[in-house]
């Protein structure tokens, strides 16, 4: 069992399934609507805990029913809530998600209490001794949460704690070039294709990756949806095939669960390609339910679906070979 500290938002996702987006000033009726726990930080921490790891989360919520829902699965999976702060004035962060039949998601986020995560509460011992710090880039956008996150990154660097940063479209749009210096010393940066192009200003993956390398970011994972994911190291760039799955209902949170499974696999001793395959499987399995955290992917389930010899007792490096193509 590894020990992780996750820094990121715990939110309420208000999800509306609609036939088409309304025109400006128009109105549409949802065919289905749900409210679910979400947020990159909350989803990554929940997924890590379900994979049998010791997880603490640093986040801030408001009071009232939204906070209870945002923290629901964090509590039930046994995530350490010592570093969760409660704001007496601001509402818990929320995201309104409009989902059309083609699976496209249009989102409206309200940062709420998350951006007020108080850095004065962070102590060196909260970071020291962890196997890894996993950070959502949304935590680096602004406010006290940014100060908290920058201090945590420095504490991790000073203590030799491995660091993984998961991008997000909102964070990349908000910070753009300002993100680059913050990623120095990060072991692996994870992002999707759109975020990669926005961050670098390039229009091809090869040029974008070259741009990141020129800035000292040498290990990158690019999530490319139905194609799988691309692992980039100084030695090679390689596509790891997607996990084929039928009956996709909702892709919300799939990228966050991918990140959790990837980081867990690396810390357990798998190489980056093996970790990417396990993460592809975990992200795909998430799409079988509506909501980022509803489906439970435990260690035994993940290893079985990934085709790992030995099931739940499998050791590092036991992932079966998967076809892939060099980029």
Image (tube, rainbow, N blue to C red):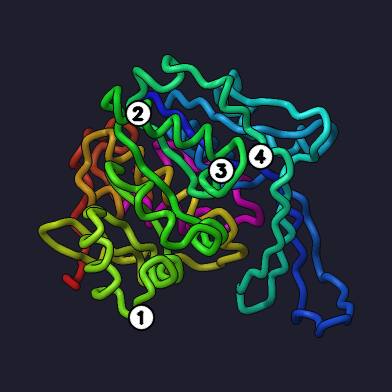
Q: Which residue is mark 4?
A: 114
- Mark 1–mark 3 CB contact (< 8 Å): no
Decide: is 53 above or below 182: above
Local packing at callout 2 (Cα closer than 10 Å; few below 14, some 14-19, many 20+) is many
Q: Under tag 4, what secondary structure?
A: helix
Q: Which residue is mark 3?
A: 43
Whether residue 283 appears in magenta in the rendering, the answer is yes
Q: Which residue is mark 1?
A: 203
Q: Earlier in the sequence, mark 2 or mark 1?
A: 2
Cα–Cα gap, marks 4 and 3: 15 Å
Local packing at callout 3 (Cα closer than 10 Å; few below 14, some 14-19, many 20+) is many
Cα–Cα gap, marks 1 and 4: 33 Å
Residue 304 seen from this side: no
Instruction: Report the span colored magenta.
Output: 277-304
- Which residue, as the protein is rendered here, is positioned at the far top? 125
Q: Earlier in the sequence, mark 1 or mark 3?
A: 3
Compared across the picture, whether 156 is left or right of 114 comes to left
Local packing at callout 1 (Cα closer than 10 Å; few below 14, some 14-19, many 20+) is few
Q: Residue at x 20, y 42 (%)?
A: 318
Looking at the rendered image, the disc whose residue lies closer to the viewer, 1 or 3, is 1
- Mark 2–mark 1 CB contact (< 8 Å): no
Where in the figure is residue 185, as x and y percent of width and height?
27, 42
Q: Residue at x 68, y 64 (%)?
A: 107
Q: Residue at x 31, y 38 (%)?
A: 311
Where in the figure is residue 268, as x and y percent of width and height?
27, 33
Quarter residue 43 falls in: top right
Cα–Cα gap, marks 4 and 2: 21 Å
Q: Residue at x 36, y 80 (%)?
A: 203
Q: Which residue is mark 2?
A: 156
Where in the figure is residue 125, as x and y percent of width and height?
42, 14
């Amino acid at each position: 069992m590894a020990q992780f500290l996750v820094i990121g938002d715990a939110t309420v996702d208000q999800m509306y399934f609609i036939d088409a987006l309304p025109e400006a000033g128009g109105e549409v009726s949802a065919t289905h609507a749900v409210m679910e726990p979400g947020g990159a930080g909350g989803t990554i921490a929940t997924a890590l805990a379900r994979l049998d790891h010791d997880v603490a989360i640093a986040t801030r919520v408001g009071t009232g029913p939204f906070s209870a829902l945002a923290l629901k699965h964090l509590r039930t999976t046994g995530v350490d809530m010592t570093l969760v702060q409660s704001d007496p004035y601001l509402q818990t962060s929320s995201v309104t998600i409009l989902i059309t039949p083609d699976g496209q998601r249009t989102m409206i986020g309200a940062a709420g209490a998350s951006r007020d995560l108080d850095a004065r509460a962070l102590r060196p011992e909260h970071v020291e001794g962890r196997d890894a710090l996993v950070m959502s880039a949304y935590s680096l956008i602004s406010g006290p949460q940014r100060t908290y996150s920058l201090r945590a990154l420095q504490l991790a660097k000073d203590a030799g704690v491995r660091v993984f940063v998961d991008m997000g479209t909102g964070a990349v749009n908000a910070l753009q070039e300002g993100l680059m210096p913050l990623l120095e010393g990060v072991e692996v940066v994870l992002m999707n294709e759109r975020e990669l192009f926005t961050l670098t200003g390039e229009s091809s993956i090869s040029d974008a990756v070259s741009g990141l390398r020129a800035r000292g970011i040498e290990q990158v994972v690019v999530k490319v949806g139905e194609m799988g994911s691309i692992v980039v190291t100084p030695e090679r760039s390689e596509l790891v095939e997607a996990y084929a799955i039928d009956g996709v209902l909702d892709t919300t949170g799939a990228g966050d669960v991918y990140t959790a499974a990837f980081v867990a696999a690396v810390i357990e001793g798998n190489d980056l390609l093996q970790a990417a395959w396990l993460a592809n499987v975990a992200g795909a399995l998430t799409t079988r339910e509506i909501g980022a955290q509803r489906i439970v992917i435990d260690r035994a389930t993940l290893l079985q679906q990934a085709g790992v010899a030995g099931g739940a007792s499998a050791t590092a490096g036991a992932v079966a070979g998967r076809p892939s193509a060099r980029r």
